[in-house]
Image (cartoon, rainbow, N blue to C red):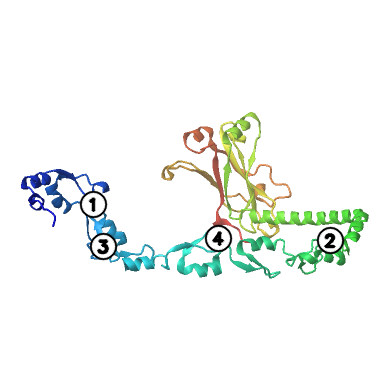
Amino acid sequence: MCSIFESTIYPDPESEKAIMGSVVYCIHHKEGCQWSDELRKLKAHLNTCKHDAVLCAAQCGAMIPRVLMQDHLRYTCPRRRANCDHCHKEFSGSALEEHQGNCGHEPVYCENKCGAKVQRRHTQQHIQQHCSKRLVPCKHCGQSYTQDTVCAHGASCARAPVACPQRCGAPAVPRADLAAHLRDHAAPCAFRDAGCRFKGTRQALEKHTEESCQQHLALVSALASRQARQLDSLRAAVARLSVNCSGALVWRISDWAAKMAEAKCKDGVELVSPAFYTSQYGYKLQASLFLNGNGAGEATHMSVYIKILPGEYDALLRWPFAHTVSFTLFDQSSSPDRACNIVESFVPDPTWKNFQRPSKEPDALGFGFPRFVSHEMLKKRNFIKDDVMFIRVKVDPSKIVAV
């Protein structure tokens, strides 16, 4: 019954054209879309606007802004396919959500708060066998303690067995019973290793120790004498084992320059080598060296000799000594192929007294070469290197005289 104007039902085409040509913002301007243009272009823009919602590409039915579509398909779409990060099995989106939090391969912290992380499927085994906070019984008193404290408890457990401090020889007793044990059982004297056989209570031991000082001193003195004899015997055995019985000695002369200087300042300075044997039960020998020469080689040459020392098996050996002896001065050249060693040897003369069976005192000089090598020759090659010289004394094994 009201009046209706024609202009209300039929808009003015010019007005409509003006409206459609007006500049507007995207309806998703608040979401961050920066588009603005004529109203007539808005629909076309919305077909591509990344903030406009469209149906999920996986057809889960959700309306998702285009800009969030990839995240939706990857993380929240119930129809997505994804692998578990722990067991690597594939699930659909909803199944993955149910699987997460229950995966047996997911590392979780021990519920006993020991700080360890284990896979969910192994938690019970960890709690029962490996957890440092699991309860274990003390093997002495039976009380339960956590695994990381049971050892500390054992050091003070009243039922743990301990040895008697008085070394009475009785079996170990519980710690709580030790005081009664010490009161009731006799203990040996502290000098029992020296030979004292006394046993008694603590009070009796204290009295015995005060009254037996002289006896204990005599026992300790006798023990020390026995031990000294044993040490001498052991030293002699070690010395016998360390003796060279190969028939050859490589003699290392160190600090050569200082020793040569001393030999030039003093007359008759002689260096002697360690003793060695021609065999295990053979002749005992020793080399001697005069760096500044001796006899015909004095002040110009280096002299070298061999001495026959009194040995343990001389009574079983044939005399005179008949080994061929050679001396070798090594050239310490960096190239072994270019080394030029100096070698001298001799065959013993059986008429010489030097090769007869020695008395308790060996020959003062021995036999050898007073002019073994000249001082000039020593300077020409690498016979002395790093202040060290090497001389080998060797007995020819083909000349060893049978016992």
Q: Outermost residue, top direction?
A: 265
Spatial separation of the CA atoms under disc 4 and disc 2: 51 Å
Which secondary structure, mark 1?
Answer: loop
Above or below — where is 272 with respect to 199?
above
Task: Give the residue pinned by disc 4.
Answer: 114
Q: Please state which of residues 35 and 345 is positioned toward the viewer in this rendering.
A: 35
Q: CA distance from mark 1 to mark 3?
A: 15 Å
Residue 292 visible from this viewpoint:
no
Q: Quadrant of the C terminus?
A: bottom right
Q: Indicate which disc, 2 or 3, sits on the residue closer to the N terminus.
A: 3
- Alpha carbon of mark 1 to alpha carbon of mark 4: how far? 49 Å
Compare residues 343 and 13 and report the one nearer the observer. Answer: 13
Task: State the residue at coordinates (50%, 39%).
Answer: 383
Q: Quadrant of residue 83?
A: bottom left
Q: Which quadrant holds residue 56?
A: bottom left
**Percent position of residue 94, x then y:** 33, 67
Q: CA distance from mark 4 to mark 3?
A: 45 Å
Q: Do the residues bearing badges 4 and 2 touch, measured as CB atoms within 8 Å?
A: no
Q: Nearer the viewer, mark 4 or mark 3?
A: 3
Q: Is residue 182 visible?
A: yes
Query: On the image, numbered disc 3 is attached to which residue?
Result: 62
Label annotation for residue 51: 1
Q: Is label 4 in a helix, a strand or a loop? A: loop
Mark 4 and mark 2 lie on one chain; the one further toward the N terminus is: 4
Which residue position is annotated with label 2? 192
Q: Earlier in the sequence, mark 4 or mark 3?
A: 3
